[in-house]
Every structure is written in structure tokens, then in C-alpha cells.
């Protein structure tokens, strides 16, 4: 919201020494966030009112004119491309040295003498947007220059003076005052300013309305919850004219274009008191009854801006006997707007429910200054003040105007004004200061609170403008006292805490360790991907949409599903990165969303459970020339698991189907008794489909499952005093016999076998297709004595025999 | 016998003196100690033939000589080896600027992870628990228990991702739901931080993304005041930034705190003089914070008369971007290794 400094000065007598910038800072520190303070027309230096004396065609350009512009003292030749430039027009003449924005965009550029298509040009005839007046004078056609002919100013007068731009605007961040309905008008803001500078606030007390009897108006409110108050009054003898300059200037300062006296009065009051109002043309209301009712389902209604809306029963409308004439709290109707020949009007000053107004405005996409205010929960007491002020102004601006009806007031509201009990001890404990009671009372009273001092406790009555929802408990009062006292004046003290170490988060510790091992030891880089995946991917991978949780309102239509695993997005990363790198080694740790299994409670006392959301680790490997990337990942995860005190194995998955996972290169990862995840290569058919040229392996495990299996190591194997003997054995064996089976069997041959390690695999040339050559190193050791070679030979012989018998190997 | 031994000794020492390299030394060793025909070996063998006192006397003498010669031999051997090693250091040379080939590939952590790790370590050192929670949250924890009534604009669908067919589920819009979950689980007193992923249904551009990271903090104890909050926030920021900082508090509205604040920090780029980074104000909006609203304490199962506390939210994504001067937020979720390999 824009604030006008001049407007505020109407209500608070601010010292001349105060600058608007200082006021802005003070407001930021104590009340609301000020985003900027701007002097009106600050960029209008060297831009004056000029009169076009002559317009000729540019000899060398079809769309340009040669103009002679008079600046009050002399004539200048100016090349102009304006489509609407004509002789005798008053224009904004940017002289040499003026700063303008070309076509209203980019940075300010200083004008210099120029030659345009061979003709000299001493300055520029400006369009409104080029000199920062685009909001005030919106363009009606392209290449249109600003026409100032309707202004009385003489040639040579600065444009800023000609337009009366002597105000300073203070831009308030609307988000910082969503909880303060009282600040959405200049009077409320002035009240705050008066407190901050310890000044007196002028009273807001317009004349009472003298009712008339010529017209009868009745108001019926069908839903008093949605409309707690509705006031209306009729005025005859209206003459629609431009509003006076002072009003136009104030409205301009806050970014509003003047329309006519009546509409301007309603807008003025909106920015003055923060109370939206509406004026109906009485001619267009049939009958004498105004009905506030829910819209009919499917009711069609055209708002002032001539847009058609389809309403529902959740929307509230103002209607006459036949039709809706306004969308309550949002916008008036096209059918009853004030026109140039309007003579009788009905002013509406009402209060509408915050939530309902916002819902209607949001659903229909019509956010207005009015709905923005109603959705903050306005004080219904303002309806009356606003109506009195509107009538007062109307009678002032239209000398022949006369109130011709009773003031109708249908009112059904109560406000909770307290009192709230507040002890001085509570104030000082919460703020952490030692304030005197009288200081607390002074602050509260200056803000309009009523305070009754009853010994140890203050009974604080909330003013109506803060009582709609803003202030209801003692903590709310703490904020009032503290912010006016000044947060910067609070002496800071560190709290004292016992030195108990925090409980460790095992899952986090595991996650951190895994990330370190993967990146530092195995050379994988960490990526973050979005939690969403696209239906396209589901389709390609042949997964069922039904198994996925779907967003109701996705930002991009192509990614509405919540990921159940990390690998789909990781595969996309692979595809993209292979354009720049020969190998892609990446991992991600993130939550996934399991529609089929339950997780945490939705509330502490609810039986409803959220979907399970495990923290997953996903790793992907793809590298040029790596034909079995599976082993890159299985050895990486083995490297990780070796860091923890747990038993694990890779269990071949032989039941793989479909064209996503490689049927012969997939494994479950079993840790302890639990399958924590899997590792496998992507089916080459699939890789081909998505355009990845290298073999790719993926791994995924649930860290929530893994953390259950991990314990801290707390013992080691005693060192043996007897030497070990190593023997190697190499053999040919059927390809499908697994390393795990062989190791398992060999370890059981004898107690002397202390280690079995595969150190070579070969399945290339000179070996049958269904065979592979394996070589193992066996470590023999006794815990009781030094082994003699004869003893080792004996056991090794048994081991070789067992290989031949169990696995049908051919010793090499 | 004695003469033989003296002669062997003399010859051996003389031979040793003449030795210049290992090969000669080995020859000498063979000559005297060879198992088959070494001169010393022969003497030792001949001892067997003696008996009585002679055997005793010469045996002792022979052993002494043998030991002495062996000692001299070993010393000479060591000397030769040593002089050879000394030579190596003078003759060998490498190019120290060459890398080891093939180069070992080094992995990288995501910039957000690096910042998060630092923050977690800092908070753990200050006695905070590090917690995590579900990213898909219930309306109850994300809004209601945080004193965000159904009428609050934050619930509008333009800010929140809702879940289809379950109007009570949302993608959490902040890490604050864990305030109430933590209170319900651990009670008071409590010191905890919650780093995590949050979601807002916002159009994406260079400085906005619908997915970002926050770090929530909550401190609950008896008699926690605004004064305490300012003091802790200052310590904390100094810990994060590893330097002295100046902060200021101003009003800010968040339904789950009362009073609520925006905390600004004196701009570190221009030292408060005003620059592009602080929009020429000298101050940078750093984090929202406030005293925990009594309703939130009640939802957490605590009596607001007995307990009080403060909460704060740190924009981790923003912090990471500032730390590394990352100009476009979209790099963070791009998975582009050209970007990620720089950290």
C-alpha cells in the first residue's frame, strides 16, 4: 500500500525537521515494513511543459515528425515519433540534460543533442512511461506521447509543478500488515505515527447525517454472519464532475486515477479510513429494497470492469428486487455504476466476513482494494464514520445535493474488547526488562487501549479497531508494549541452560557418514532433485500411476506425482550429464513417498496416518567403457557397509521381468535379516529407449531400514601370535556358480581356514562360453601353534576336493 | 689352532678393507664362511675332532673370533648399502608438478549439504537436538497446530501444494510443523533444530523455487524472554558466519509466534554503508523469529503459564547461495555436474 506523506500530515502535526525517510525507518522498526520512500516526480528535472508550434513530416523517415516546441522562452527543433502529436498541443518536453527511460524500460538515460536520420533534435517529446508517469497516465495507443493540454500550466513550467507533484509516497509491504486491519487507511496509520512521535492525532468526527424522507430504502440481510453490518443512505441532486484538485492529488499519490467526484469520494474514504464503500446509481435499482443474499448457483454477474462471472452459493451479492447489483465486498456491478448523468445515488457502507470475501475474490480472480481490506477483518464501527464522511464530502462537492432518505443500519456484531488481564511482572518477564508500570500504561493508552490499574494487574480494554482479531490475549499486548518501547532498547541477556549433551539423531549420523564415504572415498557427487516426477516417466518405466501420490495443484502439468524412489530423476541426470562427461557417478539422499504403507500420525490424537516417507539413498553409475557398472555400485555400498558393524549380502534376483531392470544383473541388498534395498543394471532395451548410450547401474536403499541394522563396533579380533600361510587356487567353473556360494563352502572346510578371497576373474578368450576362471587366496592359520607345511597341504587338499565335488570345477 | 685363527682374522680384516662393493663382499663372505669350504667353516668343523680341555679352550676362542668377524662383516655390509642410498638421493629426480596417473576421481557434496552440515555441527555444539520430519504433512501440523486458522491467507492454494483426494494433506510449506511434533514427543525443556526441504507453489525464476531448504529452531524453557532471543540469535549468527555481527529486530507477523520479529543483520558486503546486496539500506533481512505463541505451546501439550520459548527459521538455501555467490537458485536442483563439481 502507498502512503501519502501529505495525507498523514493532515492528521498529525509532524515537525518540519522530520524527513519522510526517517518516518519510513521508524515505521519499519516499530510497526510495518516500509519498502521504499519516493519523492513524486523526482526524475522530472529538466522536463517542462512545452507547446508544439509546428508539425512537419521528417524528410527522410515516414513515421517521424519534425516539431518546433516552445519552452516559454524559445523554440527548439525536436524529432518526434508520437502518433498523436498535433499543433498547439501541450506536451512534456524533455530538454537536453533531462533523464528518460527509452520506451519506459531499462535505466534512465540523459538526453543529449542528437541527429536523427539527418535532422537535429534538441530534446524529446515524452510519453508518460518514459518519465515515470505511466501509472498516472496509462497509454491508450502505441507510440502515444503525453498530452498535457487539459492542464492550465503555461509553457516552461516544470511538469512536476504542473501536475502538483509535491508529495512523498511511502511504500508499505502489504504482507507486513495482514494482521492489522486498522492500518489499511491513512487515519489508522496516522494514529500509529502520532504514537511513535508522541504527537496529538486529529479527531475523526464528520458531521452527523441529517436524514431526509423523500425516498424509502429498506435493507434485508439474509446472512448476518457474512454481513455483520450494512448501512445505506440516498442522496439526490448529484452533479457528476471532476473532483477537486486536492482530492485528485492525494489519490494520484497513492496510485489512483481520478474518475469523478462520487467515485473519487468512495476511493478517498477507502484510503482514508480503510473502509471500502460503494455508490449505486439509484435509477438502476428496481424497488426500494436492498437485499444482501448468497448468489444463486450459476448466477451470471458482470462487475464494473465489464467482466462476466459465474457465481456460486458461496458468494455473497447485494441485490435489488430483481438482480444482483454488487459482489459483496469485492466489486460493484456494471449494471448500477455511477455515470456522467447520475443524479441520485445510494451509498453503501458495510462490513463483510473476511474469509468469505477472500474466498470469493480468489475464486473469481478479482482481488480489489476493497476485498484486500475486508479480508483483514475490518472494524464494523468504521461503517458509520465512513458513511458520515462520505455524505459530508458529497454535500461539500455538490452544492445542490441533499440527503433524501433515512440512514439505514442493519447491524449484528459484537466485538471482544476484553478486558485482558496483564500483570507488570508478566510484561517484564516476557520482554526481559524492568519497565515501570506507568510507562506500560502510557504506551497502551497512547495506542487507544483503555487501562484500569487494579493493584498488581492491569485490566486492558482493546479499542474496536484492534478487536476484530488482532488482539485477544496478554501476549498480544506484550508486542504492543515492546515495539513502542523499542526492540533496540532491550538489553540482551543469554539464557542459562544445563550442559546436557543433545540426543544423537542416528539417521542423520548415518546419512552424513554415507555421504562422506561416497564422495571422499568412492568419488561420487551429490545431486538434489525435485520430489516430483512426471507421468511421462511413469509411462516409460511402465509403472502404475495408481501407486503414486498425486498433487492436487502441481506447478507444472508434467510433474504432478510424488517420487516413490530416487532413480527416475537420477536417470534423467545421467542422460543430461553424459553430454558433458565421460562418466557420471552421482548419488542423492532424500525422502520418498510410499502411498501403500503408513507412516507418522496426522495429529497426536488421530488414528489417521500419513504415507510412509523413508529417507532413501540412490546411487547411479554410468561410464564409457564400463561394461559391468553393477560392480561399481555393489563395491561402493559394500565399502559403506564395511564401515558399520553389520552383516550383509547381495542376493541375486532371478525373478526380474519387464524391460526396465536387467534380468541377469540385479540383486537385493540384505543387511542383517532385512532387505534394505537393491542394486542392478538398467535393461539395455530401456537405455536405448531413453537415449543413454552407456551401460547404467542404479542402487537404492532405505536409510530408515538400514539404520535399524547398524550398531557401533565395540570389539576387535585379537592379533594372533602364530604366522598365517597363504595358498592360491584357480579353477574353471560354471558361470552361474556364485562367489558367495563358493566362499561360504570354503570357509566351512576347516577351522584353520581363516580367510577366503577372490582375487581374479576371467571369462574371455580360451574359455568356454558357459565357464569362468576364478582364483582365490586362502589364508590358513592356527590359534594354537605355528602350522607345518604338511598340515596345510592336507587341509588345502580337502578344500580342492570339495571344490571339485560341490562345484564340478576344473583346477588349473 | 690359535695361529690359524689369528691368520684368518688378519686376512679377513685385510680383505674387508679392500672391499668396495657388495659383490666383493659376497665373495669374501663365501671364502671364509661358505658352508662347504669356507676357511672359518673348516676351523669350526675341525673343532669336532678335538676333545677335553683343548676342545673347550679352542671352541671358546673360535666362537669369539667367528662372532667378531661376522660383526665386522655386517657392519661393512651396512656401510656399503648406506653409501649407495646416499647416492640415490643425489642422482634421482622427479617432476613434482605431475599428478598421479590415472587421476582418482573425487566426489563432491551438494552446496546445501555443506552449509547444512556446518549448521548442524554448530547447533549440536550448543546443545540442540537435530530432528527431521515428514515432507508430506497433515494440515493439522502444517497449519492448525501453528495457530494458522482456516481463514489465514497462507492456506490459499497459490502458496500450498495440496494432495489429490486428501484435502488434509499438504507438502509442508515450512519446517515449523516439527515445533509441535517435537514438543509432543520430547516435552520441555527443549532445544532442537530441524533442517529440511519445504515446498511453496510459486512460479520459478532465478531467485524463487518451489522447493527450498529451511532450518527451524526452537528453544523452550522457563522464563524465556525477548532479551534472551536477541542474545541467542546474535551468538548463533556469529557462529554461522564466524565473525562479529550487528543485528536489529523489528515487528514481523507470523501466526505461530507472539510477538513476531524480522531480524536484520548489518550488511556484511558494505559494512552498513548501503550497496546493491542490501538494497542500499545497510541491513539485510536475515531471519524471522519470535516468542512461541501460547496456542502452539498448548498444541504441543505444554502449559503456557509454566513454559515459554522462542523459535526461528533460517533460509538455508538463501544462506548457501550467499555463501557461494550462486546467482540462480535453479542450479541447485539441476543435477548438473558442471555446477556440482565446484563444491
Image: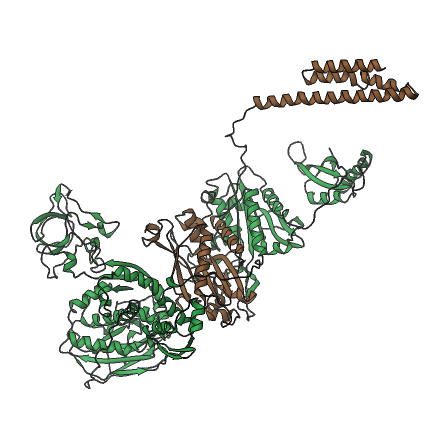
Chain colours: A green, B brown
In the image, A385 versus B312, the foreground residue is B312
Q: Quadrant of residue A396?
A: bottom left
Q: Does residue B51 lie above or below B179 as drawn?
A: above
Horizontal and vertical percent position of residue A317: 31, 75
Horizontal and vertical percent position of residue B215: 47, 57
Along the horizontal axis of the image, is A430 left or right of A311? right
Residue in the image at 28% along x and 82% along y: A409
Q: Does residue A481 lie above or below A74 as drawn?
A: below
Q: Quadrant of residue A673?
A: bottom right
In the image, A326 versus A445, the foreground residue is A445
Horizontal and vertical percent position of residue A792: 80, 36
Along the horizontal axis of the image, is A60 left or right of A476? left
Residue in the image at 31% along x and 74% along y: A328
Residue in the image at 22% along x and 49% along y: A102
- Observer able to see residue A416: no
Along the horizontal axis of the image, is A616 left or right of A180? right
Q: Does residue A52 lie above or below A258 as drawn?
A: above
Amino acid at each position: 500500500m502507498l502512503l501519502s506523506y501529505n495525507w498523514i500530515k493532515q492528521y498529525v502535526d509532524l515537525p518540519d525537521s522530520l524527513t519522510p525517510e526517517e518516518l519510513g525507518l521508524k515505521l519499519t522498526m516499530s510497526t510495518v515494513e516500509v519498502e521504499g520512500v519516493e519523492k513524486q516526480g523526482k526524475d522530472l528535472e529538466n522536463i517542462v511543459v512545452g507547446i508544439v508550434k509546428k508539425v512537419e513530416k521528417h524528410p527522410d523517415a515516414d513515421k517521424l515528425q519534425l516539431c518546433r516546441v516552445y519552452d516559454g522562452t524559445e523554440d527548439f527543433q525536436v524529432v518526434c515519433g508520437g502518433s498523436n502529436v498535433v499543433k498547439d498541443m501541450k506536451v512534456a518536453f524533455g530538454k537536453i540534460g533531462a533523464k528518460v527511460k527509452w520506451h519506459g524500460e531499462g535505466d534512465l538515460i540523459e538526453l543529449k543533442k542528437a541527429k536523427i536520420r539527418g535532422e537535429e533534435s534538441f530534446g524529446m517529446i515524452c510519453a508518460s512511461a518514459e518519465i515515470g508517469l505511466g501509472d498516472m497516465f496509462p497509454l491508450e495507443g502505441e507510440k502515444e506521447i503525453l498530452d498535457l493540454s487539459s492542464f492550465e500550466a503555461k509553457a516552461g513550467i516544470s511538469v512536476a509543478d504542473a501536475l502538483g507533484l509535491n508529495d512523498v509516497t511511502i511504500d508499505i509491504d502489504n504482507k507486513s500488515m495482514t494482521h492489522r486491519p486498522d492500518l489499511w487507511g491513512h487515519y489508522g496509520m496516522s494514529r500509529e505515527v502520532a504514537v511513535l512521535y508522541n504527537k496529538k492525532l486529529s479527531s475523526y468526527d464528520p458531521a452527523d447525517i441529517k436524514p431526509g424522507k423523500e425516498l424509502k430504502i429498506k435493507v434485508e440481510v439474509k446472512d448476518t454472519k457474512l454481513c455483520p453490518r450494512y448501512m445505506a443512505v440516498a442522496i439526490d441532486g448529484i452533479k457528476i464532475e471532476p473532483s477537486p484538485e486536492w482530492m485528485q492529488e492525494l489519490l494520484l499519490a497513492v496510485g489512483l486515477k481520478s474518475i469523478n467526484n462520487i467515485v473519487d469520494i468512495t476511493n478517498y474514504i477507502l484510503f482514508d479510513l480503510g473502509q471500502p464503500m460503494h455508490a449505486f446509481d439509484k435509477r438502476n435499482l428496481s424497488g426500494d429494497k436492498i437485499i444482501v443474499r448468497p448468489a444463486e448457483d450459476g448466477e451470471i454477474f458482470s462487475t464494473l470492469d465489464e467482466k462476466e462471472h459465474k457465481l456460486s452459493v458461496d458468494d455473497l451479492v447485494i441485490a435489488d428486487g430483481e438482480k444482483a447489483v454488487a459482489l459483496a465486498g469485492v466489486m460493484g456491478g456494471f449494471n448500477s455504476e455511477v455515470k456522467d448523468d447520475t443524479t441520485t445515488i445510494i451509498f453503501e457502507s458495510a462490513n463483510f466476513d473476511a474469509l468469505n470475501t477472500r474466498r470469493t475474490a480468489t475464486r473469481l480472480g478479482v482481488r480489489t482494494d476493497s476485498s484486500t481490506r475486508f479480508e483483514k477483518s475490518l472494524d464494523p464501527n468504521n461503517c458509520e464514520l465512513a458513511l458520515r464522511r462520505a455524505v459530508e464530502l458529497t454535500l461539500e462537492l455538490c452544492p445542490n445535493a441533499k440527503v433524501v432518505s433515512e440512514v439505514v443500519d442493519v447491524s449484528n456484531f459484537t466485538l471482544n474488547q476484553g478486558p485482558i488481564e496483564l500483570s507488570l511482572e508478566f510484561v517484564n518477564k516476557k520482554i526481559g526488562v524492568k519497565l515501570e508500570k506507568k510507562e506500560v500504561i502510557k504506551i497502551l493508552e497512547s495506542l487507544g487501549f483503555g487501562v484500569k490499574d487494579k493493584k498488581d494487574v492491569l485490566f486492558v480494554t482493546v479499542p474496536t479497531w484492534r478487536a476484530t482479531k488482532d488482539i485477544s490475549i496478554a501476549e498480544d499486548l506484550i508486542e504492543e508494549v515492546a515495539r513502542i518501547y523499542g526492540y533496540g532498547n532491550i538489553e540482551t541477556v543469554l539464557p542459562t541452560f544445563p550442559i546436557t549433551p543433545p540426543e544423537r539423531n542416528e539417521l542423520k549420523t548415518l546419512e552424513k557418514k554415507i555421504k562422506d564415504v561416497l564422495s571422499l572415498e568412492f568419488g561420487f557427487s551429490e545431486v538434489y532433485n525435485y520430489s516430483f516426477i512426471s507421468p511421462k516417466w511413469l509411462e516409460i518405466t511402465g509403472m502404475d500411476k495408481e501407486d503414486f501420490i498425486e498433487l492436487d495443484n502441481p506447478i507444472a502439468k508434467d510433474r504432478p506425482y510424488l517420487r516413490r524412489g530416487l532413480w527416475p530423476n537420477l536417470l534423467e541426470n545421467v542422460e543430461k550429464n553424459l553430454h558433458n562427461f565421460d562418466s557420471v557417478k552421482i548419488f542423492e539422499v532424500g525422502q520418498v513417498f510410499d502411498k501403500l504403507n503408513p507412516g507418522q500420525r496426522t495429529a497426536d490424537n488421530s488414528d489417521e496416518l500419513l504415507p510412509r516417507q523413508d529417507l532413501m539413498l540412490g546411487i547411479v553409475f554410468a561410464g564409457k567403457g564400463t561394461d559391468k557398472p553393477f560392480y561399481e555400485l555393489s563395491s561402493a555400498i559394500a565399502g559403506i557397509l564395511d564401515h558399520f558393524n553389520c552383516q550383509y549380502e547381495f542376493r541375486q534376483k532371478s525373478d526380474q521381468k519387464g524391460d526396465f531392470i536387467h534380468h541377469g544383473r540385479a540383486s537385493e541388498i540384505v543387511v542383517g535379516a532385512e532387505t534394505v534395498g537393491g542394486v542392478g543394471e538398467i535393461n539395455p532395451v530401456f537405455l536405448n529407449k531413453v537415449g543413454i548410450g552407456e551401460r547404467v547401474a542404479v542402487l537404492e536403499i532405505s536409510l530408515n531400514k538400514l539404520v535399524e541394522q547398524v550398531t557401533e563396533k565395540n570389539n576387535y579380533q585379537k592379533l594372533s601370535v602364530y604366522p598365517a600361510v597363504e595358498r592360491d587356487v584357480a579353477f574353471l567353473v560354471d558361470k552361474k556358480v556364485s562367489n558367495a556360494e563358493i566362499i561360504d563352502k570354503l570357509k566351512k572346510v576347516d577351522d584353520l581356514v581363516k580367510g577366503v578371497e577372490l582375487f581374479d576373474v576371467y571369462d574371455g578368450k580360451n574359455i568356454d562360453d558357459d565357464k569362468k576362471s576364478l582364483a582365490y587366496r586362502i589364508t590358513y592359520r592356527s590359534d594354537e601353534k605355528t602350522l607345518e607345511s604338511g598340515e596345510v597341504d592336507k587341509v588345502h587338499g580337502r578344500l580342492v576336493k570339495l571344490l571339485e565335488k560341490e562345484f564340478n570345477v576344473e583346477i588349473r | 689352532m690359535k695361529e690359524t685363527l689369528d691368520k684368518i682374522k688378519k686376512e679377513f680384516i685385510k680383505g674387508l678393507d679392500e672391499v668396495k662393493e657388495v659383490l666383493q663382499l659376497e665373495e669374501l663372505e663365501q671364502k671364509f664362511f661358505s658352508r662347504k669350504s669356507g676357511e672359518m667353516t673348516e676351523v669350526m668343523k675341525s673343532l669336532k675332532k678335538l676333545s677335553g680341555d683343548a676342545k673347550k679352550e679352542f671352541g671358546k676362542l673360535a666362537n669369539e673370533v667367528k662372532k667378531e668377524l661376522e660383526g665386522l662383516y655386517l657392519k661393512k655390509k651396512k656401510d656399503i648399502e648406506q653409501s649407495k642410498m646416499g647416492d640415490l638421493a643425489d642422482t634421482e629426480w622427479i617432476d613434482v608438478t605431475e599428478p598421479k596417473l590415472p587421476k582418482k576421481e573425487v566426489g563432491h557434496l551438494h552446496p546445501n549439504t555443506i552449509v547444512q552440515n556446518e549448521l548442524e555441527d554448530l547447533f549440536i555444539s550448543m546443545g540442540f537436538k537435530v530432528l527431521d520430519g515428514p515432507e508430506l504433512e497433515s494440515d493439522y501440523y502444517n497449519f492448525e497446530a501453528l495457530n494458522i486458522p482456516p481463514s489465514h491467507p497462507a492456506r490459499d492454494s497459490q502458496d500450498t501444494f495440496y494432495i489429490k483426494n486428501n484435502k488434509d494433506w499438504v507438502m509442508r510449506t515450512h519446517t515449523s510443523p516439527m515445533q509441535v511434533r517435537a514438543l509432543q514427543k520430547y516435552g520441555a525443556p527443549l532445544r532442537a533444530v530441524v533442517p529440511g526441504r519445504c515446498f511453496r507453489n510459486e512460479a520459478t525464476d532465478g531467485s524463487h523455487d518451489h522447493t527450498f531448504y529451511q532450518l527451524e529452531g526452537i528453544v523452550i524453557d522457563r522464563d524465556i524472554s525477548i532479551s534472551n532471543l536477541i542474545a541467542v540469535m546474535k551468538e548463533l549468527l556469529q557462529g554461522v558466519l564466524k565473525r562479529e555481527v550487528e543485528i536489529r529486530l523489528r515487528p514481523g507477523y507470523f501466526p505461530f509466534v507472539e510477538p513476531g520479529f524480522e531480524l536484520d543483520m548489518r550488511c556484511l558486503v558494505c559494512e552498513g554503508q548501503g550497496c546493491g546486496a542490501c538494497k542500499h539500506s545497510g541491513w539485510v533481512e536475515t531471519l524471522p523469529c519470535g516468542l512461541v505463541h501460547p496456542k502452539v505451546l498448548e498444541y504441543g501439550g505444554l502449559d503456557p503459564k509454566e513454559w515459554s520459548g522462542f523459535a526461528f527459521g533460517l533460509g538455508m538455501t538463501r544462506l548457501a547461495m550467499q555463501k557461494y555467490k550462486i546467482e540462480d537458485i535453479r542450479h541447485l536442483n539441476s543435477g548438473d555436474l558442471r555446477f556440482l563439481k565446484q563444491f
